[in-house]
Image: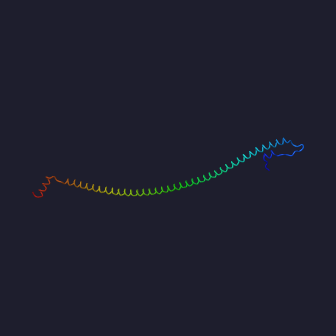
Amino acid sequence: MEISPLEIQKQSFSKAFRGYSVDEVRAFLHMVSEEIEGLLKKLELLARENSMLREDVAENQEREGILKDTLLAAQKVSDDVRNNARREAELIIKDAELLSEKMISHAMSRIGELERVIQDMKIERKSVRNKVQTVLDTFQQVLALDVEQEANELPLTQLHRRIAAENGD
């Protein structure tokens, strides 16, 4: 049963012999009425405040939900970016490995070619050295023969006497 302050103020009691003082009862009822009126105003104020706080809590819970969803989405995007970066890094590493293998293969091929060229040049050097040695040997033989002929040559006067003696003169 709800009693309003106005009902308390207007409440009347029957009179009885040796009953309570009407003025004191009225004053007390007036005081109780004012107290209840104040409490009802406070209750109404607290109810409005409670309603506003509930709305704030609901808004905050909604924001919290949005924030959680945003954080989860950001985490997912972060994970996706990290995974994509890892995959891209793996591809770059594989490409680099393939390129390095090609470069190594090319270098090894080039080394083989250079070794063949060096070997051919060594053979050519040996061949040239042998030819030069042969030419030198030939020159030495020619020089030795020339020295021998020079030693066997007679002066012109002796050569002339020898030819004359052979001809009978």
Q: Which one is nearer the viewer's eye here, 61 or 98?
A: 61
Q: Which one is nearer the viewer's eye here, 123 or 79?
A: 79
Q: Which one is nearer the viewer's eye here, 148 or 45?
A: 45
Image height of 58 relative to 30, above or below? below
Image height of 155 relative to 31, above or below? below
Q: Is residue 64 left or right of residue 14?
A: left
Q: Where does the C terminus fall, quadrant-wise?
A: bottom left
Quadrant of the rendered structure where residue 108 is?
A: bottom left
Colour scheme used in the picture? Answer: rainbow
Q: Pinpoint residue 105: horizontal percent, then vertical percent.
A: 44, 58
Q: Is residue 30 left or right of residue 117?
A: right
Q: Which one is nearer the viewer's eye here, 20 or 162?
A: 20
Q: Pinpoint residue 137: horizontal percent, then vertical percent.
A: 27, 55
Q: Pinpoint residue 156: horizontal percent, then vertical percent.
A: 14, 53
Q: Pinpoint residue 54: horizontal percent, then vertical percent.
A: 69, 49
Q: Total of numbered circles in the picture?
A: 0
Farthest left residue in view: 169
Quadrant of the rendered structure where residue 23 is?
A: top right
